[in-house]
Image: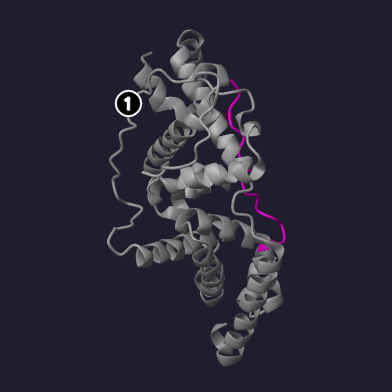
Amino acid sequence: MKCSEFLEELTNYLDGVMDDRTRAELEDHLSWCHNCYVVCDTTKKTIEIYRDSQLYELPEDLRERLRSAIVSKCHARKKSNPENA
Amino acid sequence: MSTIQTKVGEQVPDEIALVQAAKEGDVEAFEQLVKRYDRNVFRIAQHITQNREDAEDVVQDAFLKAYGNLKQFQGQSKFYTWLVRIAVNEALMKLRRRRPERTVSLDEEVKTEDDSVPREVADWSPNPEQQYSQAELRDILSRTIQGLPPSFRTVFVLRDVEGLSTEETADALELSVPAVKSRLLRARLQLRERLNRFFQRRDSNDGQPNREHGDVEQ
């Protein structure tokens, strides 16, 4: 397996969606190609860091304000158009 | 090497009943759905728009649009996937309004320099995020993802941050599964490349990681 072929399969490999034979070929490649091993490992870390980062959390006060605005507009819409609320 | 375990959105048992009640005009039932997904919608919206005010507007507009169109929701997909589709469209509209000079489309073929195999890659520290404070880390991650084309960061946030499956992401974005996979690979590789300078091992770069935060955008 060439590095370019490994890269094509990287997303499937990280997501765990592939047959056993392809997985074995990829893991064989990883065992001797340090470059691809690092790309794979650091890509996995990239995903984990973003997933665990709590980037753009909704603050509780803003959350309540938005919810209250949404609910009051839903009530208004229901009142003005009860058939299609 | 273990695979990434994503938090696949589970269909909550009472959700069908909540959606049905909301369809019949029960605002309290709809409020429960808002409480369940408002954080997700806000996160997705801010990832796409990169603007706090726009993200707030998207949360309101997406839920109100969902409420107004509940009768169109037939239940072939999960309520959450349907809601995400609405929210993504609202967020992209905000982005188009803010950047009228640039076409923003999920269908665009984005040319990148990252289709070749990365070479001479530097390994990262075992826990690279721990080199920075929470605030520094959020700043790095936010600036880094801002540099991706909107179509890439949209796929990345749905698939890798929110944990939708590839099929659900394709459904929410009205893209094919191969298109989602292609964008996801390129998004992941571009983010990795851009984070290199912050996270590489101390001993592989004159003993110090590069802690400059500037100029990570495209």
Q: Is B133 included in the stretch rendered in magenta?
A: no
Question: In the shown orientation, is residue B127 left or right of residue B116?
Answer: right
Task: Pick whichever, B142 or B189, lies toward us.
Answer: B142
Identity of the residue drawn at 45% across and 27% down: A10
Identity of the residue drawn at 40% across and 62% down: B95
Is disc 1 surrounded by few (<14), some (14 to 19) or many (20+) residues within 10 Å? few
Identity of the residue drawn at 50% across and 37% down: B212
* Quarter of the rendering occupied by the N terminus of chain B: top right
Question: In the shown orientation, is residue A6 left or right of residue B38?
Answer: left
User: Disc 1 on helix, strand or loop?
Assistant: loop
Task: Pick whichever, B20 or B211, lies toward us.
Answer: B211
Tell me the magenta residue range. Answer: B1-15
Query: What amino acid is labelled 1 in the image?
Result: Ser
Q: Position of residue B67 (x, y in %)?
A: 56, 74
Circle 1 residue: B116
Q: Position of residue B60 (x, y in %)?
A: 56, 71
Instruction: Assign the magenta stretch its main secondary structure.
Output: loop
Identity of the residue drawn at 70% across and 70% down: A64
